[in-house]
Amino acid sequence: MRIQDYLKEHKLITDGAMGTYYAKLLNNETAVSEYANLTEPEVVIHIHKEYIKAGAELIRTNSFAANQQTLKVNKKEQKAIIQSAYKLAKQAVEESGKEVYIACDIGPIPENGDRAEEEIAAEYKLICDAFLQEKPDIFIFETFSDFFYLKNLIAYIKERAPEVFIITNFTLNKNGYTGKGISAKVLLETIADTEGIDAGGFNCGIGSGHMFHILKKLRFPDGKYIVSAPNAGYPEQFKNRMIFMDNEGYFEGNMQRIVDLGVDIIGGCCGTTPDYIKKIADNIDLKEEERGIRFRFLEDDTKELTYEKNDFYSLFTRNKKVVAVELDPPFDAKDDSIIACAHKLKASGAHIITMADSPMGRSRVDSILMSVKLMRETGISVMPHVCCRDKNMIAMRSGLLGAYINGVRNILVVTGDPIPSEQRQSTTGVFDYNSMQLMNYINEMNREHFLDDPIFFGGALNYGRGPVDKVIERMKKKIQAGAGYFMTQPIFADEDVDRIRYIKSKVNTKILCGIMPLVSYRNANFIKNEITGIHVPDWVVERYHPDMSKEEAERVAALIANEIIEKLSPFADGYYFMLPFNRVSLMDKIVIK
């Protein structure tokens, strides 16, 4: 019977974790099970048969990590491992004498800066082709964090084998988000809207208790089968090994609650042995529940995000030229100077202070904490930059929640300047997100936690980075992720003014044009020659000379800024001032048009 037909009348139990169980049998946590397809096939068959004997009605091929980067193999070796994985699973089923489904298991290929997206996509297709030669009935994509490669792969498989049943599973953290910042809710919505996906849900990442609490808040889509395969729990380190506790009874109890929510396919991931699957098979009531349970709502999730309470947002709605001024937080604990700067900026008519997040990759006071203090001391609106460079997923969420409860409602999302080369041996960038992924994450937090007064966030516009149409394409993706405005790099040259004008004509968004008044001959030369992404024409540098006084240089800086503002005024929604060395006295000399 095809799995499609079986699931119309039954729920289904899968196997548990091949990788961690293999390592447990060998008493070697670092053992990689996929190699065993060629070196120890009898062990792989034995594990499959143990899961089948325990009650698994679907087993996954031993191929989750069968990619070239993880296994350090070439294409020929990779294909041999993959096809052996399918043959061994098939042999195990035949020897068991039971009717058991086999799913071709594909995990995510590691992404890093050394491999282009096209290269990774090609390898996924190579893996699919290797399996398709075996004429399988089921593919399962597991532990993914987004749909970036999946949608094309699903179409690719269905074009070659239309009857293949495709399962897509994603890994969540305890808060219900993937590592790319996508919520469980959005994942299920995308599964529902993606033609070719027959079943989908969540595996790995979390234990059964957290899995239940996440699933019970979700609406399950009609027309798709829902999958749940949590970890046994959370491992502990013992003698340099990661050990999962034996908690089959607790796991089984939570899986019963998960089944009662209307989940169709259940199983286990890391740490779940045949004993876990047997406990499920022997004790869980798998009778079919009413499909109507899929339409329950615990809360209204259809409400649109609105920003009426946000003063910064209201400036855009009144078509007022917005003035944002960037300040750099101090390197040390002395904040008197920056607080004095903030008072002066408020008096000069600035609408909002943006607080850089350790620019140039050098540690400064935290942008959110400094912003909160400025807001409390001066009453001016603040917009901390939040960059992806320094904080992992946990710290990012904590920081955003902390910013919110302290009254921060505006954020600039940036990827972050790279770490200086001399520090790279001792300091590493985190980059759990890029700026677009972080935007998606904040957008989901807005809907989940901040719906009544959401965070209004924008992004950086590196207008000179590549062909203008690519720049526009990236902007539109950020807008889809929730970005409400963009702030550009400093603008000096006429051709850059024209480029921004063209971008503005093609993208319906608010743009704050970057203005950087250069405060000395040395400052102008430094920005021109050492800062990537900022185009300073020769004529700008020639307006300065080495012997200028501070006052003379500031007058020239203000004159140039006013000239650029004049050119930008017809289409700019406002201005984003970056003042070298927090030289706020310049704002008294600049005319906003």
Image (spheres, rainbow, N blue to C red):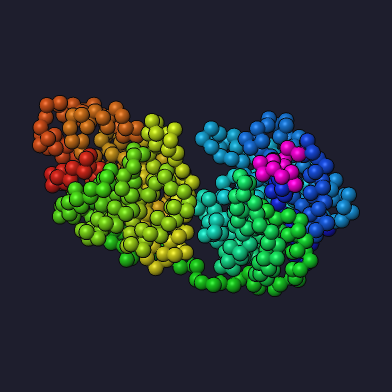
Residue 50 left/right relative to 422: right
In the rendered image, residue 15 lying in the magenta stretch gets the answer: no
Please, is residue 6 above or below residue 392 in the view? Answer: below
Count of marks overlaid on the render: 0
Q: Based on the displayed image, in which of its 4 quarters is residue 416 positioned?
A: top left
Q: Which of 45 and 418 is in front in this view?
A: 45
**Residue 144, percent across and down?**
60, 49
Residues rendered magenta in the picture: 25-36
| Residue for point 83% across, 42% down | 42
| Residue for point 60% across, 53% down | 236
Residue 581 left/right relative to 185: left
Q: Based on the displayed image, in which of its 4 quarters is residue 152 positioned?
A: top right
Q: Which of 192 and 89 is in front in this view?
A: 89
Residue 99 left/right relative to 524: right
| Residue for point 46% across, 43% down | 430
**Residue 172, percent across and down?**
57, 55
**Residue 545, percent across and down?**
15, 26
**Residue 532, percent across and down?**
34, 32
**One can see residue 479 in this view:** yes
- Residue found farthest to the front: 239
| Residue for point 75% across, 47% down | 25
Assign the N terminus to one quadrant of the image: bottom right
Please, is residue 315 above or below residue 570 in the view? Answer: below
Q: Based on the displayed image, in which of its 4 quarters is residue 420 positioned?
A: top left
**One can see residue 215 in this view:** no
